Amino acid sequence: MQNRPEALYLDLLKKTLTYALWPEPPHPVDVYKGADLTIREKALAALYKLLSSFNGDIEVVKKTSIYPEHRENGMFWPANADTMVGLKRLDNLQDCIETVLKEGIEGDLIETGVWRGGACILMRAVLAAHRVKDRRVFVADSFKGLPEPDPKQYPADKWSNLHSMRYLKVTKDEVMNNFKKYGLLDEQVIFLEGWFKDSLLGAPINKLAVLRLDGDMFGSTIEVLNILYPKLARGGFCIIDDYALEPCRKAVDDYRKEHGIASGLVPIDWTGKYWRKE
């Protein structure tokens, strides 16, 4: 029932994680930019640097036009939210977790590529709301942004400049503090720090019930699938956050084809998709 305390708590948490309860504030002009700036952006950066030299509290910002559908579908990079995946993808994540709990599908939960940690915070909150103490939430990230593309090994990533985006670089301490804000940092939350090809191989993961991938790139996606998909239990969920991005989509399609995965990809919103392992 939607008016039960557990449901009300999780609904409020999702709205808080996405900053849906407040109007979106103006965004700093340089927060989303990478190394390649336009002349206008360079001029603004120079102005910002000059103003900051006089007063470190000054920040150059621009107005935003964010509508409910943007937040519902995770269609922008927010300034203050603890997740950018949107309410529909959070609803899907909650539904997947509650389904494996109801059906007794064994295994832990993991997200690979966590940014500020919002989706993992929801994972832990769902377990807490249902008083589940025998499952863990794995929080896997480099905690220093995305890797530089390796075009020799992964040609599909050759045009990626995501590694240069300061906005995408969130430290482990910042994510841990976000868990603490919600009272959800405990022994059931396990941090896996490092590039996926290194951190996941030796991770203490035996079986997974929910595997959520948010690595954007071909390499970050295919490495996770190669290492972790065999550990996903039958009946478990594999959730892809970035299927609209060509490198990620190619990695998913290639893996599914190579391993004969016939389960249909179910759309969540404009970019998210998932399937259940048969």
Image (cartoon, grey):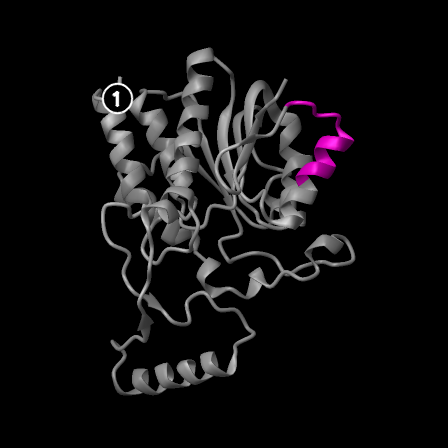
Q: Is residue 32 visible?
A: yes
Using residue 48 as the reference point, say whether residue 202 is left or right of it: right
On the rendered structure, is 41 left or right of 228? left
Residue 152 versus residue 204 in the image, above or below: below
Q: How crowded is the residue under tag 1: few (<14 C-alpha within 10 Å), some, or many (20+)?
A: few
Picture mark count: 1
Q: Confirm whether the magenta stretch covers residue 256.
A: yes
Look at 52% across and 38% down and name the residue there.
272
Does any portion of residue 187 appear in the rendered image? no
Quadrant location of the C terminus?
top right
Which residue is tagged 1? 2
**Nearest the eye: 95 or 111:** 95
Q: Quadrant of the N terminus?
A: top left
> Range of the magenta residues?
252-263
Which three-letter amino acid code belongs to the residue tagged 1? Gln
Whole-percent x, y for residue 269 in the image:
48, 38
Answer with the quarter of the image where residue 45 lies. Answer: bottom left
